[in-house]
Image (cartoon, grey):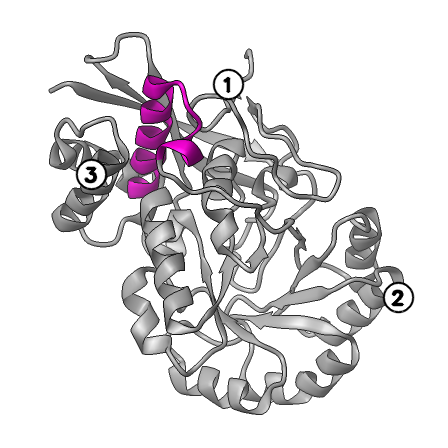
């Protein structure tokens, strides 16, 4: 076998506590992500770096990733170091194992990084995807309204803020944020609302100038999503309901937009395919992330030109990102790198 992979489980502290409506007990203080290094004996000395964020909500853990990665590696064989070879590798992974988006993402992003380095070109050039990406928003987790407002004031230079909701203080929180932040507010309930919650809040969200509502109801509550979109002037965006490209057909006509994440769908190649398919179906496109390092945010930035809205702030939520090389412009757009591969490197430990 020409390919060899090593993985490392990283436990990283968050800059501020970050809770969402479906957070597990004890979560929100630190995160766990998996970084991999991909070696190819055909290209001695070149190492591809990738990342996959295991989320129990989608059935993945570091242990499940460790079990699945060797199987995925065997499935892809020795792909050609080209855009066609990358696409073929993604197809073989999907054929070999269903779901397991984080494991696929780790291998897909590492393979893209390796192929870019083999050609001495950035990934975006290798796969022919250029164009300007939208600026990223900044996300703030559930907390006391005054605390959320204070964090919003610190993020006032971002062109939009995403506020996590799904608790008893949602309205008070959003009112407190609006008092200190004049820009667009995006609301993300992470499956935490009922129809009654949404019905009560919707008029006030409109008054407060909220830009969109993300995943208000449980993942398979399609009728509820359609019910809310039918009565809402704000776009409803599916996230937990839109895991892979296969979910798009079921959501067509029910919601205005979908949130695509590399860790859900399986990496750069699958994210591109899902975004392009979503646009073709008439969805508005949102590119999101997990609380990831610069590795996966750099990979996500490659496909960001295909999105209308961008929420790629995962590495900004970390107290200490262990990777260098990803640069955020003054307008909060991730700057395209001219360095080979994803353009990120591990800091000296």
Of the residues under marks 2 and 3, which one precedes in the sequence? 3
Q: Quadrant of the C terminus?
A: top right
Name the secondary structure under disc 2.
helix
Coordinates of residue 88 in the picture (x, y in percent): 18, 41
* In the image, residue 288 lies in the stretch drawn in magenta: no
Structural distance between the alpha carbons of marks 1 and 2: 40 Å
The residue to which callout 1 is attached is 346
Depth order, front residue of 197/135: 135
Give the alpha-carbon distance from disc 3 to disc 1, as whole Å: 25 Å
Report the mark closest to the observer, 2 or 3. 3
Mark 1 closeness class: few <14, some 14–19, many ≥20 residues within 10 Å: few
Residue at the right extreme of this rendering:
179
Q: Which portion, as a residue range, is magenta?
A: 103-126
Residue 48 is drawn in which quadrant? top left
The percent coordinates of residue 345 (x first, y second) are 50, 19
Separation of residues labelled 2 and 3 (CA atoms)? 49 Å
Residue 113 lies in the magenta stretch: yes
CB of mark 1 within 8 Å of CB of mark 2?
Answer: no
Q: Secondary structure at mark 3?
A: helix
Is residue 167 found left or right of 55 in the rendered image? right
Q: Position of residue 300 (x, y in %)?
A: 47, 43
Secondary structure mainly formed by the magenta segment: helix
Among numbered discs 3 and 1, the one appearing first in the sequence: 3
Per the image, the residue denoted by label 3 is: 89
Q: Which residue is mark 2?
A: 179
Mark 1 or mark 2: whose residue is earlier in sequence: 2
Look at the image and tell me whether residue 7 can be seen.
no
Image side of residue 201 versus residue 219, left or right: right
């Amino acid at each position: 076998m020409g390919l060899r992979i090593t993985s490392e489980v990283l436990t990283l502290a968050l800059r501020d506590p970050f809770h969402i409506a479906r957070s597990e007990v004890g979560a929100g203080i630190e995160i766990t992500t998996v970084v991999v290094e991909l070696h190819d004996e055909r290209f001695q000395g070149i190492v591809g770096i990738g990342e996959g964020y295991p989320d129990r909500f989608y059935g993945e853990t570091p242990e499940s990733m460790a079990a699945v990665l060797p199987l995925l590696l065997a499935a892809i064989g020795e792909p050609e170091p080209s855009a066609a070879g990358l696409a073929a590798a993604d197809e073989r992974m999907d054929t070999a194992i269903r779901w397991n988006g984080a494991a696929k993402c780790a291998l897909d992003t590492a393979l893209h990084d390796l192929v870019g380095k083999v050609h001495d070109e950035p990934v975006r050039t290798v796969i022919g995807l250029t164009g300007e990406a939208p600026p990223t928003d900044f996300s703030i987790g559930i907390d006391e309204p005054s605390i959320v407002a204070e964090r919003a004031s610190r993020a006032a230079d971002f062109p939009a803020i995403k506020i996590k909701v799904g608790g008893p203080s949602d309205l008070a929180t959003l009112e407190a944020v609006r008092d200190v932040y004049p820009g667009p507010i995006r609301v993300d309930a992470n499956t935490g609302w009922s129809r009654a919650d949404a019905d009560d809040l919707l008029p006030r969200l409109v008054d407060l100038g909220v830009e969109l509502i993300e995943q208000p109801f449980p993942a398979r509550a399609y009728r509820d999503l359609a019910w809310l979109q039918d009565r809402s002037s704000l776009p409803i965006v599916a996230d937990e309901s839109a895991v892979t490209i296969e979910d798009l057909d079921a959501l067509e006509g029910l919601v205005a937009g979908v949130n695509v994440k590399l860790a859900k769908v399986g990496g750069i190649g699958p994210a591109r395919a899902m975004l392009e398919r979503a646009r073709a179906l008439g969805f508005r496109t949102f590119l999101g992330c997990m609380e990831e390092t610069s590795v996966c945010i750099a990979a996500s930035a490659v496909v960001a030109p295909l999105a209308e809205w961008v929420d790629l702030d995962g590495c900004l939520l970390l107290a200490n990102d262990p990777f260098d090389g990803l640069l955020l412009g003054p307008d909060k757009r991730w700057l395209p790198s001219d360095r080979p591969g994803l353009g990120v490197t591990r800091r000296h430990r």
